[in-house]
């Protein structure tokens, strides 16, 4: 199982810009970053550990962006979701060796999809509020030491400025590569706090791969609805 992260998120200031002028909603469809589709860039992430936090602490803050080999964020960004709960769901270790699986829930955060991506509909970018974000993280140990970690992530974000049924759903894969006190490489995103400020100095980082993004319900007139009503549109 590999680390999964999904779609992108941008700072709150972008919400204002996205809501002011709309040229057109994101195009409905399902888009993939992995070959043979390769419709948009895969990415990198850095999760900060505020204060005395560690790898599995509540309050950790995720920051992920697409990476084209030169720069970040052209296709997508995920900013500021904060870990709200961490629950051990399976312990397969014996004498400190084996695997543990955790269910991690995030709250808050923003989604940013670049306006030149395969979902392009006319806007310079699309900004959404994350409505749900879950990560299933598997950690491997040898003699009590963590030697690897992968996760499955899933997210749903409501695109701002369009009908409340306009939602981006995402899943993806990624892998842990390192953490404090080892120095984070320069070509990984910043460690941010919950307000999206890059003022944190500890955390972990990894690569993000095999993303799938689905955009639905955007090409309809604006209407008011609860998130529960939006979710009911996509149930079987």
Image: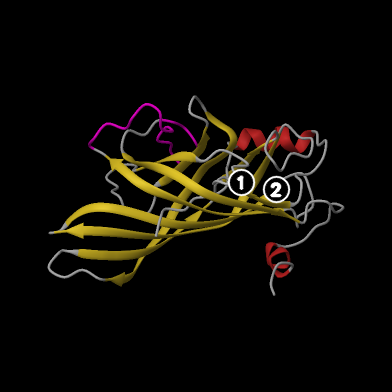
Q: Is residue 57 visible?
A: no
**Along the line of sight, the residue nearer the viewer: 46 or 120:** 120
Q: Is residue 192 visible?
A: yes
- Closer mark to the observer between disc 1 and disc 2: 1
* x then y, percent, for residue 101: 33, 65
**Along the line of sight, the residue nearer the viewer: 111 or 75:** 75
* x then y, percent, for residue 152: 45, 58
* x then y, percent, for residue 148: 27, 52
Q: CA distance from mark 1 to mark 2?
A: 24 Å
In the current view of this chain or complex, which residue is farthest to the right? 221
Asked if the stretch drawn in magenta spans residue 186, the answer is: yes
The magenta segment is: 181-198
Asked if the stretch drawn in magenta spans residue 216, the answer is: no
Identify which residue is drawn at 47% across, 53% down: 4
The secondary structure that dominates the magenta segment is loop
Identify which residue is drawn at 40% across, 55% down: 2
Question: Which residue is under mark 1?
Answer: 37
Q: Secondary structure at mark 1?
A: loop
Question: Which residue is under mark 2?
Answer: 159
Quarter of the figure that contains the C terminus: bottom right
Identify which residue is drawn at 26% across, 59% down: 140
């Amino acid at each position: 199982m590999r680390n999964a992260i999904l779609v992108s998120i941008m700072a709150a200031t972008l919400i204002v810009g996205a809501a002011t002028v709309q040229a057109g909603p994101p195009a409905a469809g399902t888009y993939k970053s992995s070959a043979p589709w390769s419709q948009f860039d895969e990415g990198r992430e850095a999760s900060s550990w505020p204060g005395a936090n560690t790898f599995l602490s509540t309050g950790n803050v995720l920051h992920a962006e697409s990476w084209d080999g030169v720069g970040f964020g052209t296709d997508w960004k995920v900013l500021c979701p904060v870990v709200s709960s961490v629950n051990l769901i399976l312990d397969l270790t014996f004498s400190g060796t084996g695997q543990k699986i955790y269910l991690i829930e995030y709250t808050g955060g923003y989604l940013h999809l670049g306006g030149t991506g395969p979902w392009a509909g006319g806007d310079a970018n699309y900004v959404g509020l994350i409505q749900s974000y879950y990560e299933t993280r598997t950690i491997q140990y040898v003699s009590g030491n963590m030697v690897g970690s992968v996760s499955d992530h899933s997210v749903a974000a409501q695109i701002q400025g369009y009908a409340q049924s306009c939602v981006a759903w995402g899943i993806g894969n990624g892998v842990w590569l390192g953490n404090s006190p080892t120095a984070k490489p320069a070509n990984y995103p910043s460690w941010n706090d919950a307000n999206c400020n890059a003022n944190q100095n500890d955390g972990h980082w990894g690569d993000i791969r095999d993303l799938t993004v689905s955009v639905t319900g955007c090409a309809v007139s604006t209407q008011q609805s609860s998130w529960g009503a939006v979710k009911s549109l996509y149930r079987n």
